Image (tube, helix red, strand yellow):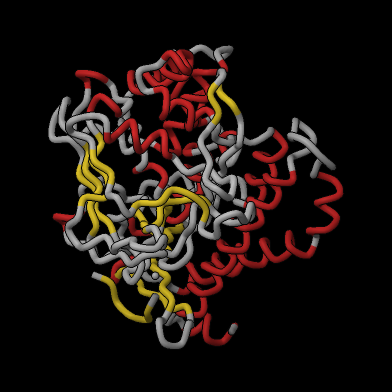
Amino acid sequence: MWASTRIRPLCLLALVIHAVAVGSTELPTDEHGDYDGSDLIEWIRSHPEGDIHPSVRIGRERPGDPTSINGLFVSSAPGATPIEKGDVIAQIPWDHIIHPDGKYGKYKFSSCRAIYNLAKELNLGEKSKRAPYVRYLLSQSSGFMPGEWSAAGKDFFSEVLGHGELPPFEETWKNHFENEWLEECHGNEDDEMEKRAFWLTSSRDEDTLMVPIYDMANHNNDPDKLNTLSYKPEKAGDAFRFVASKKILPGEQIYNSYNRCNRCSDVPKDDCETFSFYRTPDLFVHFGFVEDMPQSWQFDPAILDSEDSSDDDTEIEFCLERNVVSGAIETFWEEDAMANEADVEWLQVQLKRLGKLNEDKKRLEKELVAKKGAGDSKKMSQMEWESIWRYHDALSKAIRTGIEASDTEDSRDEL
């Protein structure tokens, strides 16, 4: 149960497309020079079980604008029709999905075999039976997720997080490749295609499935904008279905939710087909972006206390939502996870520390950011720097809002 004080995402994951050739085949583009996925659509429709709604458009939100995000949209071309509630947006045959073979299970959420199979397809390139999808995947940029960052980027992000005091906690991201791929899956540290497959899977798969077209939909949990449901195969061999949950008009974006079943959502249990319970920090780890409202946060003042670290009673949990009328950010607490006086004091210490980093931002940038190119052990890239500060600002805002919404006497006195 969630109690008031009150608080909801419109989070746009920009799928960055490189206009590159893979082998001898270039990515298809529209009249604006933007990738249009026409090869993927034709390939999927060529299968007896494949279907892509005729109104689906792949491209940029603002065609021809290189600063605009890529995603799925309803075409606004003359004669284009809406996608109606219940319409199939995409039905992807099993043969067109990159999957863990017979090891697939609807309730299985990770698979070494799926990553190995993706690496195999990437190595095959144009010789792959899934070449249109492989071509697209090989065009994707990398380095967006904290686990991919340079040593300097990781070290500074750890400093922002208080070296383990604030989420996301280091065990979930700092050595993610080493722990998940090298140790658990016995991967090859020197195989660059395996590494690429690991990070593509981390950021794009639906549990153990790499699903073309579906993985192009951007994230949004705003109930007024989220407009789809997805249905995983019941068993190996079945198709994946992506369906409209409401009418989607020409020109509107087709959104997915990457954490549909998180603690802050009001989604019916029957709609929790993809079983994603990520909070806002988890999305940053796995996708490299900070979601817009609504957001889901959890803090634990005792996380570094060896005696209390396993005690759920020390956790603070709340949801942040944007009021649709006023635009103000509101907080909803879980009734048994509201901040007490000691929690507020701890949050104030964290907020002060984050504020001090912000005061030193210009000096830190000169010391820690490479002038151009990728980062290394001493300098991080500009992209890493900017990504860390986007998270820093969201984290600071969440903590500040939690303090302001607290019912404790100390917080009212302080603020």
Residue 269 image-quadrant placement? bottom left
- Residue found farthest to the front: 78
Image height check: is 255 above or below 234? below
Residue 295 locus on image (x, y percent): 43, 64
Residue at image position (47%, 60%) is 11
User: In screen coordinates, is 257 left or right of 351?
Assistant: left
Quadrant position of the N terminus in the picture: bottom left
Residue 278 appears in view? yes
Residue at image position (41%, 75%) is 331
Comparing 386 with 333, the one in front is 386
Quadrant position of the C terminus in the picture: bottom right
Residue 204 image-quadrant placement? top left
Residue at image position (39%, 70%) is 8
Image height check: is 366 above or below 27? below
Residue 332 locus on image (x, y percent): 36, 74
Residue 202 locus on image (x, y percent): 44, 34
Comparing 84 with 46, the one in front is 46
Residue 282 appears in view? no
Image height check: is 398 above or below 144? below
User: In screen coordinates, is 268 left or right of 208?
Assistant: left
How many numbered markers are drawn?
0
Residue at image position (33%, 35%) is 211
Residue 167 locus on image (x, y percent): 50, 51
Image height check: is 213 above or below 313? above
User: In screen coordinates, is 212 left or right of 355?
Assistant: left
